[in-house]
Amino acid sequence: MDKKPAILAIVGSLRKDSFNRRLAEITRDALGDRATLTILDFADVPLMNQDHEFPPPDAVRRVREAVKAADGIWFFTPEYNHTYSGVLKNLIDWLSRPISKTEPQVLGGKPAAISGITPSIAGTIPAQDHLVMLLSYLNMRVMNVPRVSIPGVFGLLDEDGNLALGDAQNFVNEQADAFLAFINRA
């Protein structure tokens, strides 16, 4: 790939101060000037409803275009009851639908990475495993190794409430390097 890769970050939480949004921002810093990482805003995407599929709502068109333009998709998933969030599933449902009778869904063939951070001790591995299954079914090229799952987020907050990964930063850096190489193999 001759140009700087464009990576779209999809954060599975709509919360303004989401820990996974913060992890996406830290990941953007880890990528530095080797790639651009844009965090997708999809709070305005409505619930999937086939009654409104054609033509799709403007918000759906916008997120589909963002996915189409990206060289890779990086999912940052929280863990909700050992799986990914409902808002993430809703977005993926919209993205998994064909755009028209002649244009397929936008996720097929896209490189994907998965990371997550959570307060729980178990981390986000159960959510990530469910997400891998779904993304694989949708024909994404999932980078299964390495994945990053950071447990115990409350122990990683400094006195001002900022996320300080400490030794876990090395895992983020390694995943950033690996995902850039994975995208370039496309």
Image (cartoon, helix red, strand yellow):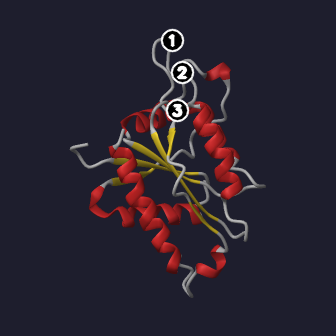
Q: Which quarter of the rendered picture does the N terminus lie within?
A: top left
Tell me, yes or no, if residue 164 can be seen here. Answer: no
- What is the total number of numbered labels drawn onto the structure image? 3
Q: Is residue 37 above or below residue 59?
A: below
Tell me, yes or no, if residue 78 can be seen here. Answer: yes
Image x and y of residue 142, in percent: 52, 43
Using the image, tell me which numbered label, if any, was put on residue 60.
Answer: 3
Answer whether labels 3 and 1 touch (C-beta < 8 Å): no
Q: Which quarter of the rendered picture does the C terminus lie within?
A: top left
Answer whether labels 1 and 2 touch (C-beta < 8 Å): yes
Using the image, tell me which numbered label, if any, was put on residue 101.
Answer: 1
Between residue 153 and residue 126, name the one nearer to us: 126
Image x and y of residue 89, in percent: 66, 41
Between residue 107 and residue 53, name the one nearer to us: 107
Kind of residue sitting beneath label 1: Lys
State left or right for residue 91 relative to residue 62.
Answer: right
Image x and y of residue 29, in percent: 37, 66
Between residue 142 and residue 24, name the one nearer to us: 142
State left or right for residue 152 relative to residue 184.
Answer: right
Image x and y of residue 179, in percent: 41, 53
Name the residue rendered at 67%, 74% in the picture. 152
Kind of residue sitting beneath label 3: Val
Kind of residue sitting beneath label 2: Pro
Q: Mark 2 — residue?
A: 98
